[in-house]
Image (spheres, rainbow, N blue to C red):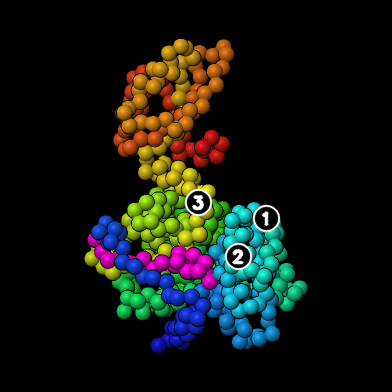
Amino acid sequence: MSEFRKCARTAEAAMRSVFPATPLQLNAHLSARFDADIWLKREDLTPVRSYKLRGAFNAMRKLRVSAPDQTIFVCASAGNHAQGVAYMCKHFDVQGVIFMPVTTPQQKIFKTQVFGGDNVEIRLVGDYFDDTLAAAQTYCSEAGAAFLSPFDDEDVIEGQASVAVEISNQLGSAPDHIILPVGGGGLSAGVRSFFGHSTHYTLVEPEGGMSLAAALETGAPVSLAHVDGFVDGAAVARIGDKTFARLSDMNLSDVLAASEDRICATMLEMLNVEGIVLEPAGALAVDALVDVADQIRGKTVVCVTSGGNFDFERLPEVKERAQRYSGVKKYFILRMPQRPGALRDFLETLGPEDDIARFEYLKKSARNFGSVLIGIETSSPQNFEALFRRIEQAGMTYTDITNDETLGQFVL
């Protein structure tokens, strides 16, 4: 057994004094859909609803041995890492200073404080994470505190590998195929280092933050010029140096991109069909099943659902994006004659399953035509073909703006 595997097993055993192993559940719905044995490793069911407390636990556990006088631990995070660190500060009865951006939602600040209690101090610094990180690192230098990286640390990677230890124990062997989400790379580096070549890997990144794919293409970690922050648990601009060292021999074809809108459809499916609440990053592995359907047929597959810290205030946005992805909701600008009866003419073009979700019109004087912003929901994408044909036959013109990102920022 390799030294890494021994250390990962030691870390996993030590964790049992803090929280139980998360379930590995055979999912009948997904198994039937993809003609495979699909198991979900439910990291969304840890005490902080993500796997992040594993790495935080292992890093703090080892520091308390190597530097017993170290009593102040620091992190910079707006999400799951902050909650994991806070939980472990309370467990080890040490002090934690957690730096979060000023823009962090109040719900995340509240949960972090609840997990850490009197053992943590939260400092809101900077509008952007880079500013928050710089402040945390400056504080560490001045106060002699220990900085806990969210992913780019060997002890953190080792702690995240405890997920693989549990899968091995629960399944009795390595799965044929394992699907993992990737942000900074701590989870994927740890699991892959534990299982080695005994299983096939699919790593999934959000389309708006493919830092691992970029690093594989160039041969070294690079910083992305732009990151879409919707999948906040995995939207990382630069893969870690240490994590990339463990992932650098991945085949680029096994690193997939998941569109943010499709992830929303997967989140809703898991919520409505299975009653499982996943955050966007937590749904990445399940979302990728459709991309590897031909590879996994008849095999034993594990999807790691990495987190369930979902703020239900975001549910309307998730539903909106899911509907647009599936093609059952569209927005368009209708050019309509400014005459009595024109609105009635448009309404008569609607089919029995077409529902108006949005309608904005302001009559302009001295104009023959006016523009109307319309949102339509329907039961099938094919209904729009018939609707647009009827609109044209009625002598009206339209512009579909559903996928226009620039207009969407202002009107959708």
Label 3 or label 2, whichever comes before in sequence order: 2
Q: Position of residue 222 (x, y in %)?
A: 55, 63
- Is the Cβ of the residue at disc 3 closer than 8 Å to that at disc 2? no
The amino acid type of the residue labelled 3 equals: Phe
Horizontal relation, residue 236 to residue 203: left or right: right
Label 1 or label 2, whichever comes before in sequence order: 1
Disc number placed over residue 65 in the picture, else none: none
Against 309, residue 388 (above or below) is above
- Start-end of magenta stretch: 34-53
What residue lies at 62% left-to-right and 55% top-to-bottom? 106
46 in the magenta segment = yes
- Is the Cβ of the residue at disc 3 closer than 8 Å to that at disc 1? no
Disc number placed over residue 114 in the picture, else none: 2
What residue is pinned by disc 3? 312
What residue is pinned by disc 1? 102
145 in the magenta segment = no
Please tell me in which quadrant of the rendered image residue 60 appears.
bottom right
Q: Position of residue 279 (x, y in %)?
A: 47, 57
The amino acid type of the residue labelled 2 equals: Val
Please tell me in which quadrant of the rendered image residue 163 appears.
bottom left
What residue lies at 52% left-to-right and 23% top-to-bottom? 361
Q: Secondary structure at mark 3?
A: helix
Please rate how many residues cluster around mark 1, counting C-alpha atoms within 10 Å: few if below 14, some from 14 to 19, many from 20: some
Horizontal relation, residue 134 to residue 160: left or right: right
Q: Nearer the viewer, residue 144 or 87?
A: 87
